[in-house]
Image (tube, rainbow, N blue to C red):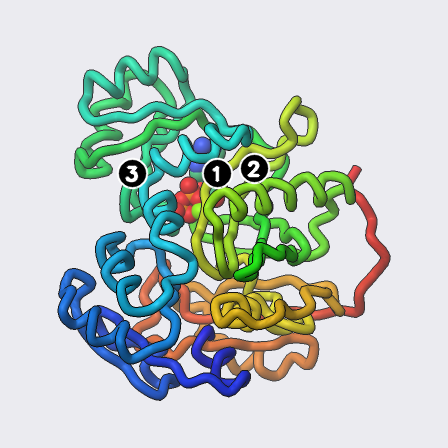
C-alpha cells in the first residue's frame, strides 16, 4: 500500500524483504535478502533516496547501517523503542504519559515478584516479536505463573496489569521533516483473539478526549524526532484520572488506519510517503464515516458478496493461503459523515 501510494505521487520504489510477498508485485525494484546481510543492505540503500520500513522487527543494526547511505525515516531509534515492549513502556513513562503498571521478567523468580507487586489479573508478553496477540499469556492467579512463562517460550518478557478499559483507540500521527504534525481522526478499535477486527470512525470520544489522545501522539513523535506516520494504541478509561493508558507504539502505518484509504482525502500511506519524501503533508480530513473490518483467514472467501455491496470498498492483499488468523484483506463500509456525537 505504501508502494502504491508512492507510485501515485510519481515515485518508484525499491523493496527489500527477507522473502517475496504481495509488495513485490507493485514495486519497480525488489531485493530479497536477510535483514542481517549488511552488505546487501548497503547496496540497497545506495540505490534509493530515502529508506523507510513498514514493520517494526527490522533489526535496528540494519536501519543504522542503511543510514550511512540514505536518510532512514522514521529514524532507527523509533524502531528500537517499538520493538522492545520494555523500552516502549519505559519511553512512555519517561515522557510523562500514563501507562499501566509493568515489570520486566527474565525468570520465574522475577515473574513471582512482579505478580506480587502488580497483582492479578495480569498479562505476560514477550519483549520482542509479538504481534496480533501472539507471545502473550494471561495470568488469572498466582499458580498460573509457571505455565504462562512456558507458554511464551521462556523469552525475556514484561508483565503488565490487565486493564479494564471502556474501549481501545489509536492515534495516527503524521510528522513531517520540519516537525509539522497532523492527526487523523481517532478510531475506536475492537479486537477478537488479540487480532484487530474492527476500526470505527467517529469513535464517539468527546472532542476534548480526541484532542488529549492527539497530544499523546504528538508528544511521542516530537520526542523521537519522528518522520512519517506513528501509531499509538491507547486504552480509554474515561472515569480514571488518566483518560488514556499507552498500550503500544507502532513506528509505521497501521491496520487501524486502513479506513483512511477510502474515507479521507489523503490516506495514511500517502501521508507517510509525503512525510519521508519531505513533501508538504496532505489533508487528513475525513469526508465519510467509516467502519473497517479485517478479513481474517477464510473471511476473504466471501469476496463475491462483499464486492457486490455498493457501500463497501474491498481490499484483498494477494496472499496465497487464507490460514486461520491471517490478515487476508479488509473492507471499509462508508456512510455520509454525520455531526459529531459524543459517547455517554
Ligand atoms: N495490559 C492489557 N490489559 C488489557 N488488555 C490488553 C493488555 N495488553 C494487551 N491487551 C489486549 O490484547 C491486544 C493485543 O495486545 P498488544 O499489546 O497490542 O500486542 P500486539 O498488538 O503487538 O499483539 C490489545 O489490543 C488489547 O486488546
Ligand atoms: Mg497492539
Tag 2's secondary structure?
Answer: strand
Residue 194: x and y, percent? 42, 46
Compared with 295, 320 (above or below) is below
The residue lying at 74 percent from left, 47 percent from top is: 204
Tag 3's secondary structure?
Answer: loop
Residue 153 visible in the displayed image = yes
Quarter assignment of residue 199: bottom right
Q: Are marks 1 and 2 in contact (CB under 8 Å)?
A: yes
Indicate which disc, 3 or 1, sits on the residue closer to the N terminus.
3
Query: Which residue matches tag 3?
Result: 127
Query: Which residue matches tag 2?
Result: 235
Q: CA distance from mark 3 to mark 1?
A: 13 Å
Tag 1's secondary structure?
Answer: strand
Some atom of ligand 1 lies within 8 Å of the CB belonging to the residue at label 2: yes
Q: Are marks 3 and 1 in contact (CB under 8 Å)?
A: no
Query: Which residue matches tag 1?
Result: 247
Some atom of ligand 1 lies within 8 Å of the CB belonging to the residue at label 1: yes
Quarter assignment of residue 271: bottom right
Amino acid at each position: 500500500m505504501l508502494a502504491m501510494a508512492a507510485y501515485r505521487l510519481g515515485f518508484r520504489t525499491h523493496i527489500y524483504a527477507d522473502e517475496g510477498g504481495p509488495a513485490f508485485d507493485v514495486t519497480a525494484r525488489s531485493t530479497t535478502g536477510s535483514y542481517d546481510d549488511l552488505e546487501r543492505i548497503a547496496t540497497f540503500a545506495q540505490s534509493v533516496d530515502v529508506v523507510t520500513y513498514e514493520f517494526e522487527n527490522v533489526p535496528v543494526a540494519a536501519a543504522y547501517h542503511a543510514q550511512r547511505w540514505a536518510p532512514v525515516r522514521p529514524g532507527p531509534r523509533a524502531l528500537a523503542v517499538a520493538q522492545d515492549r520494555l523500552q516502549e513502556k519505559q519511553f512512555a513513562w519517561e515522557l510523562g504519559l500514563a501507562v499501566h503498571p509493568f515489570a520486566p521478567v527474565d525468570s520465574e523468580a522475577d515473574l513471582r515478584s512482579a505478580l506480587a507487586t502488580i497483582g492479578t489479573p495480569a498479562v505476560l508478553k514477550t519483549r520482542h516479536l509479538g504481534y496480533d496477540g501472539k507471545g502473550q499469556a494471561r495470568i488469572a492467579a498466582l499458580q498460573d505463573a509457571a505455565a504462562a512463562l512456558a507458554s511464551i517460550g521462556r523469552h525475556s518478557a514484561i508483565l503488565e496489569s490487565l486493564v479494564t478499559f471502556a474501549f481501545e483507540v489509536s492515534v495516527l500521527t503524521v510528522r513531517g521533516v520540519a516537525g509539522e504534525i497532523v492527526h487523523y481522526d481517532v478510531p475506536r478499535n475492537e479486537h477478537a483473539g488479540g487480532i484487530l477486527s474492527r476500526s470505527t470512525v467517529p469513535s464517539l470520544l468527546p472532542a476534548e478526549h480526541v484532542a488529549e489522545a492527539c497530544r499523546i501522539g504528538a508528544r511521542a513523535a516530537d520526542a523521537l524526532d519522528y518522520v512519517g506516520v506513528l501509531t499509538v494504541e491507547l486504552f480509554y478509561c474515561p472515569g480514571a484520572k488518566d483518560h488514556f493508558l499507552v498500550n503500544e507504539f507502532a513506528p509505521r502505518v497501521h491496520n487501524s488506519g486502513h479506513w483512511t484509504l477510502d474515507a479521507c482525502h489523503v490516506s495514511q500511506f500517502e501521508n507517510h510517503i509525503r512525510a519521508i519524501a519531505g513533501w508538504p503533508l496532505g489533508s487528513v480530513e475525513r469526508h465519510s464515516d467509516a467502519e473497517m473490518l479485517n478479513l481474517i483467514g477464510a473471511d476473504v472467501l466471501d469476496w463475491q458478496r462483499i464486492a457486490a455491496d455498493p457501500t463497501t470498498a474491498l481490499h484483498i492483499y494477494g496472499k496465497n493461503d487464507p490460514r486461520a488468523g491471517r490478515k487476508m484483506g479488509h473492507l471499509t463500509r462508508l456512510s455520509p459523515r454525520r455531526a459529531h456525537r459524543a459517547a455517554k
